[in-house]
Image (spheres, grey):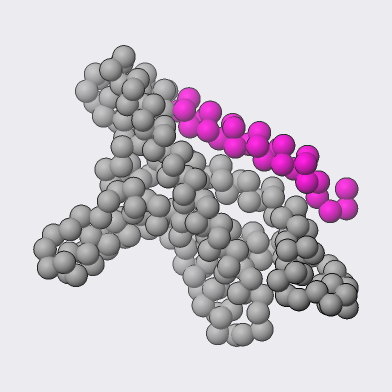
Amino acid sequence: MGGFTTQFVVALTVTISLALVSGCLGTVFGLFLAISKGTALPRVNAVVTAYTTVVRGVPELLIILLIYFGGTTLASKIAGRYVEVNAFTAGVIALSVVFSGYATEVFRGAIAAVPAGQTEAAKSLGLNAWQRWVFIIGPQMLRLALPAYGNLWISLFKDTALVSIVGLTDIMRVAYVGAGSLRAPLTFYLAAAALYLSLTTVTLLSIRLAERRYPALGR
């Protein structure tokens, strides 16, 4: 297994990069959708609701396959020749879509939980919409959303394993190849499990630290 140690290190870097990029993009898009859903525009609310319903109702693996093969088909038609979408790019897009779908509902619930009197008080002080978000709604929403938002990150690190099906050389892919090459599936899959467990454990500890640093309202 010694020859696969370096591959596991590289794969770990790929997995972390995939999760961080997808999580950050999904967070930004999810927050945007959550804010949009809070508007008084029925059409906007309907579009956002339809988006989150579809994303949360379709398996993550299917979304990855649709984006990978759909993107390849679209790129090939545009280029006039066969063009294969990069596995990392397809994974980032797919996981960002999945993350944003769940994050939207997490942020929406947290925003709704902020007392309306806080916003009214901010308006009476003359704060504009941007200032109300930065100084009043945002900090309170963050504290309320933190536990559920942290769970999304834990799920995201585990979901990165699904991207290996389209050829991305991540932890799961290296474990699969190593298990087949050396005929030692238990050894390689246990190694992969240990790496994923280490990632989720670090994430969980970070969440706990953040929760202690930013205690929930009412405590």
Question: Is residue 113 at all visible to an observer of this figure?
Answer: no
Q: Residue at x 73, y 67 (%)?
A: 133
Which residue extends farthest top? 2
Residue 5, image quadrant? top left
Task: State the residue in front, 152 or 92.
Answer: 92
User: x, y (%) of residue 20?
Assistant: 49, 45
Q: Which residue is drawn at 44% across and 42% down?
A: 17
Question: Is residue 193 at all visible to an observer of this figure?
Answer: yes
Task: State the residue in front, 44 or 182.
Answer: 44
Task: State the residue in front, 141 or 49.
Answer: 141
Residue 137, image quadrant? bottom right
**Magenta includes 17?**
no
- Rendered position, 47 above or below 83: below
Predominant secondary structure, magenta span: helix
User: x, y (%) of residue 31?
Assistant: 60, 63
Report the magenta residues as a range. 193-219
User: x, y (%) of residue 199?
Assistant: 53, 33
Quarter that holds the N terminus: top left
**Magenta includes 210?**
yes
Q: Residue at x 55, y 35 (%)?
A: 200
- Rendered position, 177 above or below 162: above
